[in-house]
Amino acid sequence: MFEYKPDYADVLARYEAWWQAEIIDRPLFSLSLPVPAEKRTSPPIKTFNHPRDRWLAQMRAEFGTGA
């Protein structure tokens, strides 16, 4: 299903088992590591002329609606 997660179906089954308070073959495990400082990027800074414009931009980004 996913290019970078070929065992997605197995992972999905583990999550379903976890929600049922069961374990299929091993417990769930998640690992998150920080990105080295030299590879970090900041998001672009957006400026808006009016608070309404900022709100509309956020709604479009989240819900895909246009106005």
Image (cartoon, rainbow, N blue to C red):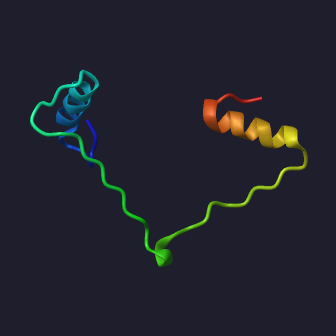
In percent of width and height, residue 52 lies at 86, 37
| Along the line of sight, the residue nearer the viewer: 37 or 49 | 37
Quarter of the image holding residue 66?
Answer: top right
Residue 61 appears at what percent x and percent y? 64, 38
Determine which quarter of the picture holds residue 41. Answer: bottom right
- Say which residue appears at 25% left-offset and 35% top-offset: 1
In the rendered image, the vertical position of residue 50 relative to residue 60, given as above or below:
below
Outermost residue, left direction? Answer: 25
Q: In which quarter of the image is the C terminus?
A: top right
Q: In which quarter of the image is residue 63?
A: top right
> Is residue 61 depicted above or below 18 in this figure?
below
Q: In percent of the image, x 18 and y 26: which residue is there?
A: 22
Pick whichever, 15 or 54, lies toward us: 15
Q: Pinpoint residue 21: horizontal percent, then vertical percent.
A: 23, 25
- Residue occupying the point 15% across, 31% down: 23
Up-down relation of residue 5 to residue 38 (above or below)? above
